[in-house]
Structures are given as structure tokens and as C-alpha cells.
Amino acid sequence: MILGDGYLERNKPTHNTRLRVEQSRIKILEYLESLHELFEPLTAMEPTILTRNNKKRGIITQSLYFRTLAMPCLNYYYELFYKDNKKIVPNNLDKLLKERGLA
């Protein structure tokens, strides 16, 4: 998920991490709903529409998202995939992912 539609949020180094899944194509609602169903035991929210006003481009966009609860087990992945609050690809990604994980 972290390499695709998901990203990790951590407000402070002393806080736990949560997963946020966001899909910009609201018309593909079934995909996000299936992910929400998978993560439902770990979330306290329903998928929510987010409207953004991009003043530079003069357009309004919408996306659908949900996020999990903040959990200490996600801190490990935040430390692997984020440096200075920017997402990175870890050098040892080949050791972290197996064939099934890539699929």
C-alpha cells in the first residue's frame, strides 16, 4: 500500500503512525471500498470525500480517502519509507518484498 495509493502519517516522532489511503478517481469507488473493508478493524472512519481547490491550476479536485488508527506497529514502516518527512524507496526493498507482495 505504501508504494501505491497509501502513505503513512506521523505528526511527531513521539507519536504513532497511521496509514492513509486516498484515491483521486472517485468513479472507481469499489476499489477504495474494498480496501476499507480490508482495513475496517483498524479504522474508526468511513471513506470520506475530500475537495481541494487548486488555485494555481484553477481547478477543483475531489478524492476519496480513509485512514487507520495510529498504531505503534506502523512506526517501523514509517522509519523505513520516510526520511525527513519525504517518502523514499528503501535500499533493501528487494529483501522486504516477496513475489506475492509485488503482485
Image: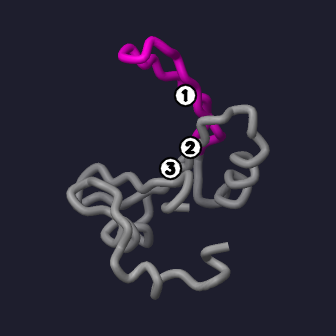
- How far apart marks 1 and 3 lie (CA) works out to 13 Å
Quarter residue 80 falls in:
bottom left
- How far apart marks 2 and 3 lie (CA) works out to 6 Å
Q: Which residue is mark 1?
A: 50
Q: Residue furthest front?
A: 57
Looking at the picture, tell me which residue is in the foreground, 75 or 14. 75
Looking at the picture, tell me which residue is in the foreground, 83 or 73. 83
Secondary structure at numbered mark 2: strand
Quadrant of the image containing the C terminus: bottom right
How packed mark 3 is, by other alpha carbons closer than 10 Å (few <14, some 14-19, many 20 or more), is some
Residue 73 screen position, x and y as percent: 43, 72
In the picture provided, is 93 more to the left or to the right than 68?
A: left
Circle on res. 20: 3
Residue 63 screen position, x and y as percent: 58, 32
Dot 1 or dot 3: first in sequence order is 3
Q: Main secondary structure of the magenta part?
A: strand
Dot 2 or dot 1: first in sequence order is 2
At horizontal 59% and vertical 59% (from top left) the residue drawn is: 42
At horizontal 55% and vertical 57% (from top left) the residue drawn is: 4
How packed mark 2 is, by other alpha carbons closer than 10 Å (few <14, some 14-19, many 20 or more), is many
What's the residue type where badge 2 is placed? Glu
Mark 2–mark 3 contact, CB under 8 Å?
A: yes
Circle on res. 22: 2
Total numbered labels: 3
- Magenta extent: 45-66
Badge nearest the viewer, 2 or 3? 2
- How far apart marks 2 and 1 lie (CA) works out to 9 Å
At horizontal 59% and vertical 36% (from top left) the residue drawn is: 24
